[in-house]
């Protein structure tokens, strides 16, 4: 079994959660003995519990005590260090990766055929690449909390992939964050995102395991 990491920087985890709730317009996180709780209140996403320390006893106790379907766990450890200790009913999701980067003001240009639009509202900056017809080809958003910028919901439409649009969106977001005074970027990536962001200078902080409690 893979050992859990011991180099997790707790302020980094806290900054990620603080930025995530701004990005998603969710309630402020609540400190719990095991980490942080966010009462999201959405169908299929009732609440999320962020657990920095994948201690087996904590995982078993917490996953047994939580009974509302649609509750999520976000645990700072790989799946093989988490899954054996979860109570029945929890579905482990695909691997995720919490990544960080030192921000630099390096803006990117929109490729031919696309227009770059950047807007900020309620503390959330959104970068979009638009086609000539005004359709969103790629987008992403960020929220700055203190000296950290949390990048979130980066996606490229199916018909526009493998054209470097995700790179343009990411560089636009990180340059914007640097201009706002942020020094560090944080995000949680899928496996595909991890591969892309690694080429842009992002480094792995910790593997993440997401699990959701299914309805009986």
Image (spheres, helix red, strand yellow):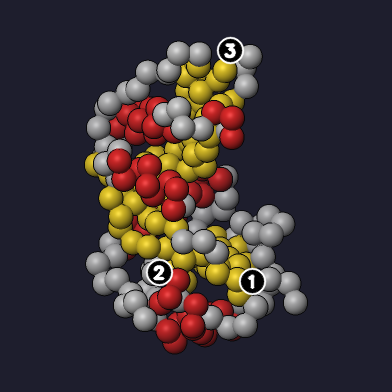
Please state which of residues 185 and 28 is positioned toward the viewer in this rendering. Answer: 185
Q: Which residue is mark 3?
A: 132
Q: Give the vertical position of 45 relative to 153 (above or below).
A: below
Residue at position x 40%, y 69% from top?
78
Image quadrant in which you'd find residue 159: top right
The dot on residue 78 is 2
Estimate how packed mark 2 is, as few (under 14), some (14 to 19) or many (20 or more) residues with alpha carbons within 10 Å: many
Please state which of residues 166 and 76 is positioned toward the viewer in this rendering. Answer: 166
> Residue 71 at x, y = what percent?
62, 67
Q: Are marks 1 and 2 in contact (CB under 8 Å)?
A: no
Q: Which residue is mark 1?
A: 213
Lateral position of residue 111 relative to residue 93, left or right? left
Label 3 – label 1 distance at C-alpha: 43 Å
Q: Secondary structure at mark 3?
A: loop
Estimate how packed mark 3 is, as few (under 14), some (14 to 19) or many (20 or more) residues with alpha carbons within 10 Å: few
The mark lying in front, picked from 3 and 1, is 3
Residue at position x 68%, y 71% from top?
214
Lateral position of residue 102 relative to residue 90, left or right? left
């Amino acid at each position: 079994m893979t050992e859990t990491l011991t180099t997790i920087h707790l302020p980094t985890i806290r900054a990620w959660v603080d930025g995530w709730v701004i990005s998603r317009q969710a309630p402020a996180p609540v400190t719990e003995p095991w980490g942080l709780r966010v009462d999201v209140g959405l169908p299929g996403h009732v609440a999320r519990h962020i657990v920095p320390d994948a201690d087996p006893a904590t995982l078993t106790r917490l996953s047994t005590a939580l009974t509302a379907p649609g509750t999520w766990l976000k645990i700072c450890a790989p799946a093989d260090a988490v899954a054996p200790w979860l109570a029945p009913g929890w579905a482990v999701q695909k691997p995720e990766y919490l990544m960080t980067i030192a921000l630099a003001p390096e803006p990117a240009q929109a490729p031919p055929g696309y227009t770059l639009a950047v807007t900020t509202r309620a503390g959330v900056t959104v970068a979009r690449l638009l086609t000539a017809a005004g359709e969103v080809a790629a987008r992403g958003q960020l929220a700055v909390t203190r000296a950290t910028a949390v990048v979130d919901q980066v996606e490229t439409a199916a018909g526009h992939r493998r054209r470097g649009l995700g790179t343009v969106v990411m560089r636009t977001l990180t340059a914007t964050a640097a201009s706002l005074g942020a020094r560090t970027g944080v995000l949680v990536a899928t496996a595909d995102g991890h591969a892309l962001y690694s080429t842009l200078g992002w480094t792995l902080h910790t593997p993440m395991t997401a699990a959701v409690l299914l309805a009986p």
